[in-house]
Every structure is written in structure tokens, then in C-alpha cells.
Image: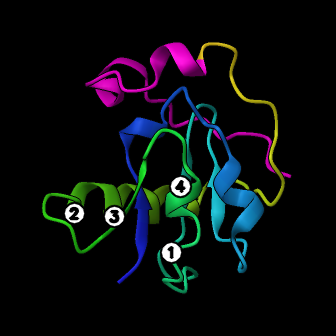
Amino acid sequence: MTYVVTDACIRCKYMDCVEVCPVDCFYEGENMLVINPSECIDCGVCEPECPAEAILPDTENGLEQWLELNKTYSEEWPNITQKGDVPADADALKGEEGKFDKYFSAAPGTGS
């Protein structure tokens, strides 16, 4: 098992999760984070820290696409270990449906 970041993170990117991760397995895109599934130790400390409830265990049904997306982009985007600035409109977009199709960007973030 591993944890994955879903589309609830897109344009919210609160980053509280990176502060508690003991193995630094988060990677930053322009408008979301992903988890490297081969680095994740399944401790679960990140899941309750996410205000957007974007982090889920990959054992939940229907998360195959998110596991693949997390795997792919964690190999391309820079590692992030410190919380950065939260997008100004994060709270307004929290809970919005269909964010992947509307807002996803494959561009990397800056990392830290």
C-alpha cells in the first residue's frame, strides 16, 4: 500500500503534508503535489494533515489513475520538503469537482 494525492490538491496545494512526511516523498508540480509510491512508507501521517482531503490510501477503489499519475510526476517534478506559499484562491477552490480536467498542469514546481 501507498498513499496518493488526488485532484482535490489541484490549485489548493496547502502543503501541510510535506512538513510531517518522515521520508520526504512529496514532489511539487506547478499547481499540485504528488507522492512517490516507491518512497512512501505507508505511515499515513500525511493524510489527516491535508485540509483538502486530497491524500488517500491506494487501497481505495478507483484510485489506479491517481497512483499512475503520482508515480509518473514524482519522477519528473522536484522534491519538496518544506511548506511553501499556499495559492491565494486555495480555500475558494477547495472541494470543487472536476479540477483535473479544468486546471491540471504537468509543469514542475520549484521544489524546496
Q: Is residue 81 magenta?
A: no
Compare marks 2 and 1 and give the one earlier in the sequence: 1
Q: Is residue 101 magenta?
A: yes
Instruction: Indicate which disc residue 64 carries.
Output: 2
- Which portion, as a residue range, is magenta? 90-112
Residue 43 in percent (x, y) is at 54, 83
Instruction: Indicate which disc residue 17 carries.
Output: none
User: Secondary structure beneath disc 4?
Assistant: strand
Label 3, on which residue?
67
Instruction: Indicate which disc residue 34 carries.
Output: 4
* Relative horizontal placement of residue 57, taking residue 28 as reference (left or right): left
User: Secondary structure beneath disc 1?
Assistant: loop
- Which of 44 and 70 lies nearest the eye of the viewer? 44
Instruction: Indicate which disc residue 44 carries.
Output: 1
Camera-near label (4 vs 1) is: 1
Does the rendering let one see residue 79? no
* Most distant residue in the front direction: 48
User: Secondary structure beneath disc 2?
Assistant: helix
* Contact between labelled residues 1 and 4, with CB atoms less than 8 Å apart: no
